[in-house]
Image (spheres, rainbow, N blue to C red):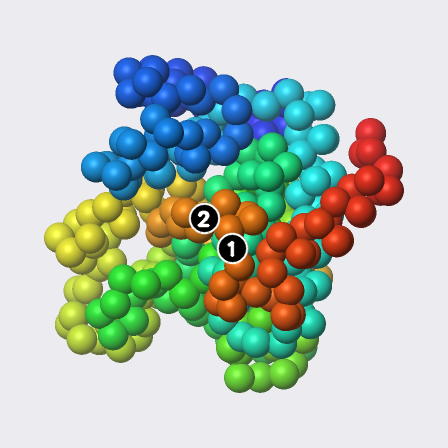
Amino acid sequence: MNATPAGWPLTNPKEQARLEGHFKELGIDFSKPGFHDSTAFLAVERVRPEILDDYARYVEVRAYSEADLQTAQRKIEVAARVVSAAVNADGRHGLCVTASGVLSRMLDELGVWNFSAKATMTVTFPPSVSLEKRFFFALDTGNFVAPHALVVAPPFLAVDTTASAQSYGDKAMEQAVPPLILQKQLIPYRWKDEDIASPLVRMSQGHGFSVRRYLQVRNPLMLKRMEEFPGRVGVFDGGSAAYVITGVGGYTEKLAELDSENTMLSGKTPIELFETQVLPQLATSPQRV
């Protein structure tokens, strides 16, 4: 798709109209961000969980004004930096689902269109660090579990607060990846089997193995998501992270309800981070023009 005048490259008027018609038929008000928390939406979701994919698709294909994108960008940058700093201070690996879910809920609270996505990640390092890519697969030993998570929030196609907090097993690799990736430019990525399935899975399926054929039989919904949500690349100094979205996730609880130990970052609950860091920074940081 070509970039639109409003600056969001995934805008698709035909798909937006289709989804809006779908939501209207279901009695769902789609006029404001976060309508996935509405009573009407939740009633449908109880019998059709895949409607959350429709919400995410709507975030990606709807039209945005330049003013909307500028306002959203400021909020996203502040909240993402707070979450990324908390992840870095926490020090644990594998916080991608927690961090992305927390950030998504913060953005919901701020009235920003967004969704949390499950995804694969293929990291290309600066040549001085490694000539080998690092793959975080969706299919490994037969499990359909996405190894990474990020947030999509226009004008950002990828907001990754945990790219450097993965288990690389190599300090130089870890240090080469920034703690926060904010990708505005659309760099399409056409996935290959090696991005999605581990060598063990590919070997176990034998010669002629194809991820697409495998998923058509074993997990057509995952393949549908991979086709609907375009692959994208986040770039950083000397390297990149390629993402293939395999599902839509996030927390069912709202921000103030995320008070369990599993949702804490660096010893703080999400609402504490939001009220003591995000809101004060937004109150003092200049409006982007």
Q: Is label 1 in a helix, a strand or a loop?
A: loop
Q: Residues within 10 Å of mark 1 (few under 14, many from 20)?
A: some
Q: In which quarter of the image is residue 203?
A: bottom left
Determine whether the residue tagged by mark 2 lies in a helix, strand or loop: loop
Residue occupied by mark 2: 253
Left or right of 167? Residue 19 is left
From this view, report whether residue 125 is shown above or below residue 218: below
Residue 258: which numbered mark, if any? 1
Answer whether residue 14 is visible to the viewer in this image: no
Q: Are marks 1 and 2 in contact (CB under 8 Å)?
A: yes
- Please state the horizontal and vertical placement of residue 120, each as a whole percent of the image: 42, 59
Q: Measuring 53% from the left and 75% from the top, which residue is drawn there?
A: 93
Q: Identity of the amino acid at label 1?
A: Leu
The residue at the point 69 percent across, 72 percent down is 89
User: Please, which residue is most extreme toward the left here?
Assistant: 217
Q: Which amino acid does label 2 sit on?
A: Glu
Pick the front one: 238 or 255: 255
Q: Tell me which corner region of the image, top left, top right, bottom left or bottom right, holds residue 119.
A: bottom left
Label 1, label 2: how many angstroms apart (C-alpha)?
6 Å
In this orientation, which residue lies closer to the viewer: 128 or 277? 277
Q: In which quarter of the image is the C terminus?
A: top right
Specify which label sits upstream in the sequence, 1 or 2: 2
Q: Name the residue located 64 percent from the left edge and 70 percent from the top edge.
A: 266
Write down the quadrant of residue 193 in the picture: bottom left
